[in-house]
Amino acid sequence: MRRCLGLDLGTTNSSLALADADRAVSLARFPHSGGLSETFRSILYFHPDAQDARRGITSIAGGEAIDRYLEADGTGRLIQSLKSYLADTGFESTNVFGRTYSLTELLSFLVRALRKIAEEQMGELGPRIVVGRPVHFSGGRADDDDAFAEGRLRTAIAAAGFEEIVFEYEPVAAAYYYESRLDHDELVLIADFGGGTSDFSLIRVGPSARKAKQADRILGNDGVGIAGDALDAKILHNLVSPSIGLGSSYQSMLGKELPVPVWIYAKLRRWHHLSFLKSKRTTELLREILDQSLEPEKIQALVHIIDHDLGYHLYRAVERSKVALSKSDRTTFLFEDDTLRIEHPLSRTDFEAWIAEETDAMSECVDRLLTRVGVDAREVDRVFMTGGTSFVPAVRNIFDTRFGSAKIEAGGEMISVASGLALRALDLDRA
């Protein structure tokens, strides 16, 4: 039997699983400063001193990338959320310390690093792998965009040494994981929340259902390019950005009062765009604004964040607040670095008002799926929610109100998709 591998290459976290003939699944474990984890951070780090005359700049990936970045006090380039670019036809490459890297090349660095660590534990992985993909890629607006994104993802994975690549929808993979624990049949709605996309599948699972062809089991799939990153961005925009200059003004050289450009904060709302604000053009503009600002302390705070590449630290502060609001009605947002301190009270009520557009889009997607396949919510036996955003009360409420809290089940938030992909690989091997 060939090795049955599943790869969940996520926007924020990735994981790799291996299924054996008895349907037992093992997951690769990845090192970081805190020990070992079943998830691999989808992050690349480039240090300006790590240059090689023949090969260019050496990248570091995963948890080690974060550790090295923190050790270097923000020196270098941290690149996150690469998967979010896959459907963007306008983004082909980026320049890192004088060398141009294509998006597929950067993604291949991630997969190569992940594969190397996994093979140290599991042995040679072989040429075939089943890879998860969202129903609709983040930023995609049409089927052609999804096909374009999948093609780029295939190229990146092939560059990491895999020759036989099979794609499977991520919520379908999560259904395989959920089904592995069942001793009876169910009609289940899978709600899989990643960093960049929220995906939904309505599928029949269980011992009897497993005997049917997959096409007969899956009633429908749908998804929306909104998930954890978008919710984080709302906290950043509404709570943090006003403290670092959003809405403030400066005097132009002609004496006219002008607003600080909003596009700077639009970039800041997306973690993976923060590094791009370190361009010479943007840096010079910010220095000019700082000299003429009516609230220079706010612009200085923005310059400090950009100059010291503090995107990861800011991301962690926002994430801590979001997690706290999943357990409590109120929390305090706090971000500190050197002399910079941003502190604000934050309520769940405010947060839910800020993310209403996103949760409405998720709700509409779920309703659209049910309507298209002709299934009433009462016919659904169970809702299985997975992924970090499933903990957000406003997101969970989408399903509580439609299906009833008694039908909601959660689990395997970070590893369900990879595990399910490995089980899917096993079924393909036996077909």
Image (cartoon, rainbow, N blue to C red):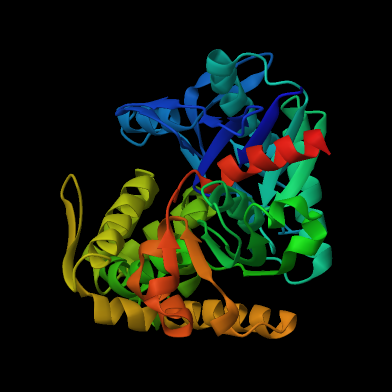
Q: Position of residue 72 (x, y in %)?
A: 34, 28
Q: How many marks?
A: 0
Q: Nearer the viewer, residue 404 or 279?
A: 404
Q: Position of residue 116 (x, y in %)?
A: 59, 19
Instruction: Determine the residue positioned at 37% across, 80% down.
Output: 354
Q: Nearer the viewer, residue 334 or 41?
A: 41
Q: Position of residue 230 (x, y in %)?
A: 47, 67
Quarter of the N terminus within the rendering: top right
33, above or below 430, in the image: above
Instruction: Determine the residue positioned at 66% across, 82% down.
Output: 375
124, above or below 383, in the image: above
Rendered image quadrant of residue 235: bottom left
Quarter of the C terminus within the rendering: top right
Query: Going by the image, does 223 lie left or right of 154?
Result: left
Rendered image quadrant of residue 57: top right
Q: Nearer the viewer, residue 219 or 421?
A: 219
Instruction: Determine the residue positioned at 66% across, 56% down.
Output: 172
Query: Going by the image, does 317 lie left or right of 274?
Result: left
Is residue 369 visible in the rendered structure shown here? yes
Rendered image quadrant of residue 372: bottom right
Query: Going by the image, does 88 lie left or right of 322?
Result: right
Query: Going by the image, does 171 lie left or right of 217?
Result: left
Q: Position of residue 12 (x, y in %)?
A: 49, 48
Is residue 98 visible in the rendered structure shown here? no
61, above or below 92, in the image: above
